[in-house]
Amino acid sequence: MHRIFFAAAAVSALLVAVPAVAQQVVPVTFAKGKSSATLTGSIKGDQDRTYTVDAKAGQKMTVTLKSTKGSAEMNIFAPGNDTAISLGATDPYNVTTVLPATGRYRVQVYQMRAAARRGEVANYTLTIGITGAAGAAKPAPVKLDDLQGARAAGALDEMERRGFRNVDGFQSGANGSGTVWWNGATRQCMQLITVDGRIDSVTDIKTHPKCR
C-alpha cells in the first residue's frame, strides 16, 4: 500500500468536513452516547490524512471508506505498529474486526502512487466505529503469504514453527497435493496446495471438520 494515515480535530458522530492538508493527523472522538463518527475529506496528489482512535483489546472496530470522487485507499495500523495490517479484512474498504491490543489505532487515507503522481484529487467519506466491551482478544492471525511459491518441504516445517498442526491431506490434480492446517490459538484453518514440489496456494478456508 502507501504511507500512514490520521489527522487533528475532534469529530462527532455527525458528518464533518475536513480540509485537505498533507500528512494531517486527526484524533477521532465520538459524541456522547454514540459509538461511531463519520467524516468527509479531500486529498490531492501525495497528500494523506491519518485518523486516530483509542480502543481496547476485545472491542470491535468497523472502518468504512467510500470515494465520492477519484479513488481513495486506506491502511490500518495497530498501536505501536508501523506495518499496515488488514486485521482479517476481506473487503479493503469495509473492515470489521475484534481488536488485538489496547491503544491508539490509526487509519490512513491516501491515493495509490500513479494517481498521486498525476496530482489527482480524491474525495471520500470515512466512518469509524468502536463497539463492545473490552476483553481478552484472540492473537492476531499468523501471516502466511510468504510461503506461496516456497519449496514444500521447508514450507510445511515452517507451518509447524508458526503454531499450526497438519490435520488432513488429499490429492489435488495430477501433480498436486493438499494439506489442511489448524492453529488453535488464532483459530485459523489453512489449506496449502503443493504442485511440483512448491506451494502453489495458501488459502484460509475458515472451517473444516478437523479444524478444531
Image: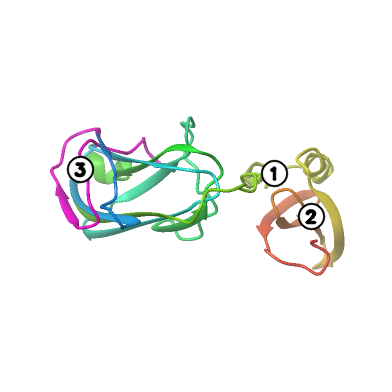
Question: Which numbered tag is attached to residue 181?
Answer: 2
Q: Residue at x 56, y 44 (%)?
A: 100
Which secondary structure dominates the residues rendered in magenta? loop
Residue 62, given in percent of the width and then of the height, sits at: 42, 56
Residue 84 as seen in the image, left or right of residue 73: right
Could you tell me which secondary element the residue under label 1 belongs to?
A: helix
Residue 165, given in percent of the width and then of the height, sits at: 84, 50
Residue 132, given in percent of the width and then of the height, sits at: 48, 56
Give the residues in magenta: 1-24
Pointer 1: what residue? 147
Classify residue 53 by image quadrant. top left
Residue 58 as seen in the image, left or right of residue 75: right
Question: Which numbered tag is attached to residue 42?
Answer: none
Q: Amino acid at mark 2?
A: Trp
Nearest to the observer: residue 200 or residue 42: 42
Residue 161, given in percent of the width and then of the height, sits at: 80, 38
Q: Residue at x 86, y 65 (%)?
A: 170
- Where is 4 relative to 74, above or below? above
Residue 3 on the magenta segment: yes
Q: Alpha-carbon distance for marks 2 and 1?
A: 13 Å
Residue furthest toward the front?
A: 33
Q: Earlier in the sequence, mark 2 or mark 3?
A: 3
Pointer 3: what residue? 118
Q: Earlier in the sequence, mark 3 or mark 1?
A: 3
Q: Alpha-carbon distance for marks 3 and 1?
A: 35 Å
